[in-house]
Image (cartoon, rainbow, N blue to C red):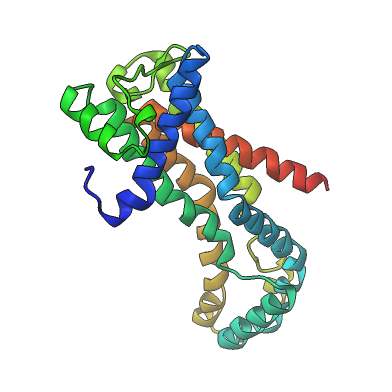
Amino acid sequence: MLQANFFNQVFVFPILNLLTLFYKLFLIIGLPGAFGFSVVALTVFVRFLVNPFFKQQLETSKKMADIKPQLDKLTLKYKKEPQKLQQEQMNLYKQAGINPAAGCLFMIVQFPIFIGLYQTLSLLLTNGQGEKLINSINKVLYFPFLHVAKIDPWFLGFNLALTPAKVKLWYYYLIPVITGLLQYFQTQATMPAMTSTAPTQTKEITKNDDPNKKKDESTGGDFQKAMNTQMKYFFPVMIAWFSYTLPVGLALYWNIFSLFSIVQYRQMKKK
């Protein structure tokens, strides 16, 4: 786990050192629930670190909403020419300065950090406080003053090392519910607008149209709708399930992250 491989050196070790630094600072000032506030501080730090990717996602979402009427017109105009439609859509994206893949960067960047945090919390909390483990952790800390003897996992009445699935107390079950709801609101707020076929499309279909052709023409819109639905509903449910089965400390990180994203999006929307 603490081997000096690429992933550990790039993600786990820096996160471990930064988390330990915050923990030490909060212990010095005598802050109750120091480790929980360390996770919050780490979340804020990471949030500012990936902020350029989030801003790009918000800008992409706004631009997609702005050009949606034009995309709908292209869908009607080239409904029988899917290759031409795709070409014209890409030209429109280019003119508007949109990279369709940019909206995914924010999520892609988050996952290695999330995995690194999971492994870090597993080291500090889930695997216990054995002397051998503590010594192995201290060996990868960059400075001697960061060395720890033990970690207190309690924060606002929750043990950050445990999972709601393991604790089986009613107030722990609130964590995955809150996590799923926050992820839903974040996804709903930041997800780029999807194209859709206009209602007038069905009126232009004549009795001589081939039913199979009509089915093919609607495939693109159906696919986009399915992707929209999956991102809006399936992803929050998946995150809620993760927060049910993984340590509470990870849900704390994810929820603070989601709150920042929602607030930032609303501020940008007001502007």
As drawn, 94 above or below 5 = below
Task: Decide if residue 67 is on the left or right side of residue 191.
Answer: right
As drawn, 241 above or below 190 = above
Residue 51 is situated, as x and y percent measured from the top left of the image, at 61, 50
Total label count? 0
Res 158 → quadrant: top left
Which residue is at the front of the view, 123 or 59? 123
Which residue is at the front of the view, 209 or 4? 4
Residue 55 is situated, as x and y percent measured from the top left of the image, at 66, 54
Which residue is at the front of the view, 167 or 112? 112
Do we see residue 243 in this rendering?
yes
Q: At 25% across and 50% down in the image, what residue appears?
A: 4
**Quadrant the N terminus occupies:** top left
Residue 162 is situated, as x and y percent measured from the top left of the image, at 32, 22
Task: Decide if residue 217 is on the left or right side of residue 151.
Answer: right
Q: At 51% across and 59% down in the image, what residue appears?
A: 227
Residue furthest front as drawn:
144
Residue furthest left as drawn:
132
Residue 57 is situated, as x and y percent measured from the top left of the image, at 63, 57
Q: At 76% across and 73% down in the image, what residue appears?
A: 70
Do we see residue 192 in this rendering?
no
Q: At 43% across and 15% down in the image, what residue appears?
A: 171
Residue furthest right as drawn:
271
Task: Decide if residue 20 is on the left or right side of residue 219.
Answer: left
Which residue is at the front of the view, 84 or 256? 256
Task: Decide if residue 156 is on the left or right side of residue 47.
Answer: left
